[in-house]
Amino acid sequence: MAQQGIHGVWANRWTFVLAATGSAVGLGNIWKFPYITGENGGGAFVLVYLLCIALIGIPIMVAEVLLGRRGRQSPINSMRYVAKEAGLSSNWSAVGWMGVLAGLFILSFYSVVAGWALHYVFQTGTGAFEGATREVSQGVFGELLSNNTALISWHTVFILMTVGVVMAGVTRGLAMVARVLMPLLFVMLIMLLGYGMAAGDYVGAAKFMFSFKVSALSWDGVLIAMGHAFFTLSLGMGSIMAYGAYMPSHSNIGQTVVTVGVLDTLVALVAGMCIFPIVFASGIEPSSGPGLLFQSLPVAFGNMPGGLFFGTLFFILVSIAAWSSAVSLIEPGVAWLIETGKFNRVTANLVLGGASWLVGISCALSYNLLADFKPLFLANRTPFDFLDFLTAQVMLPLGGLFIAIFVGWRMAKAVMEDEMDAEGHPMLDIWLFVLRYISPVLVVIVFVMTLMNTFAG
């Protein structure tokens, strides 16, 4: 059953690599991974994380790309196609539906935080943090969160940036982000790394992130590594399946996915070595949580030689990372609307971008007008916190689990061999064993333990 897509194909393997890396690289790489590495054993945590990437992230990502390239359509219709090909119920398309909805929900609150980064580009660039104290920085951030107009305006700007790229299509829009923004992100990272080495405490940062402290690696730390390995590659939200649908048929899926995993991890590690030399040189607490990004670092940049330029560069970097991730969140739904024959790229983006924008307004207001709005139907959470919980803790793990089960247990091995050009190759059997018996078990462990910790807390 040869399947032809209607959306276009990446020009080459490296365009897919850069696009998928752009989807994977986001705020979590720039802030969260360096922080959790330092707090959970440094080098010991990195080793556990890499093992989890190998046992969870890479196997499930290969499966998701395989499904997308086999179906050559949106995640919803790709799942329907591969299920029909396997002689199974079309209800498997629910996996695609869950991914599409998860992506739109994530975009709704992700764009709010990305809007903060855009705001800080201008704040830092205009000298708002020059010589600033911690109190001044906290005041700037607090003023932003209390300003409904500013929050909604930046949220709107970021949604328009995202929709504008996806409107341009696969080759002119999504591929542009891959070919232009990702190399620009890498260049900025290298510049900031050089600045951190020259102006910061590089030795202290290296010890913090890479010292091999097994005693600091708790069971909770292992769970954090497992969970981050899954979420950092954008698994279960339809993005990778949609991008896989545009992958050239001659590209090797396994080698390509491994390359994406390596680049994603390198970006996270380099980001840590950009941030923490500045953190340690400024005497800032490295476990400052979200405040590290929007309260502590501006003070550090504002009081260092050349800090305003590199601080502005840093927040541009954060914004680009968020932007490259966001375009992959809306593309699966846009592709499906186009496939219905009732929408083109412009109208599909307007509908879904508008929906995410409306939901995102409630997320923006979660920091002021709706801060105390925590009804039972939102599990006693604000709209922002509820969507974060629903997607990260429920929808994405379930999506990844069902993908592993479908490909591992329900798809014919001949189909896998055909798509991966791996007939009789021992690596196919190794991957299939991991996908069947190891990846699902680890995802279930993360899913159950995280929910237990959430509700226990």
Image (spheres, rainbow, N blue to C red):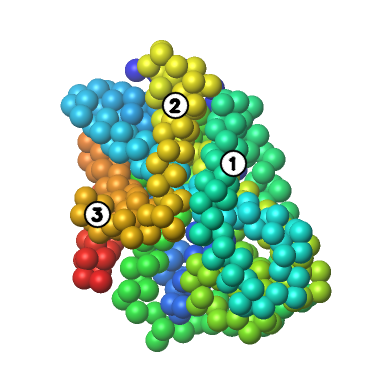
Q: Amino acid at mark 3?
A: Pro
Q: Quadrant of the rendered structure where residue 165 is?
A: top right
Residue 70 image position (x, y, % from top left): 39, 28
Ranked by sequence position, the earlier of labels 2 and 1 is 1
Q: Is residue 211 above or below residue 455?
A: below
Q: Amino acid at mark 1?
A: Val
Q: Taking 55 as reference, is 333 above or below it?
A: above
Tell whether 423 sits left or right of 152: left
Residue under the image location 35 percent in, 51 percent down: 383
Q: Is residue 57 visible?
A: no
Mark 3 or mark 1, which is nearer the start of the sequence?
A: 1
- Which mark is in front, 1 or 3? 3
Report if the CB atoms under discs 2 and 1 are less than 8 Å apart. Answer: no
Choose between 224 and 59: the one closer to the eye.
224
Disc 3 crowd, CA 10 A, few/some/many (<14, 14-19, 20+) = few
User: Residue 161 in the image: x percent, y percent?
Assistant: 60, 38
Give the x, y percent position of residue 92: 23, 32
Q: CA distance from mark 1 to mark 3?
A: 29 Å
Q: Quadrant of residue 77?
A: top left
Tag 1's secondary structure? helix
Mark 3 falls on what kind of element? loop
* Residue named by callout 2: 351
Residue at left offset 72%, top offset 65%: 128
Residue bearing the label numbered 1: 157
Q: Amino acid at mark 2?
A: Val
Q: Identify which residue is drawn at 24% across, 62% down.
A: 451
Q: Which residue is mark 3?
A: 375
| Residue at the image position 38 percent from the left and 59 percent from the top | 371
| 364 or 163, nearer to the observer | 364
* Quadrant in the picture for the C terminus: bottom left
Q: Which image quarter: residue 87?
A: top left
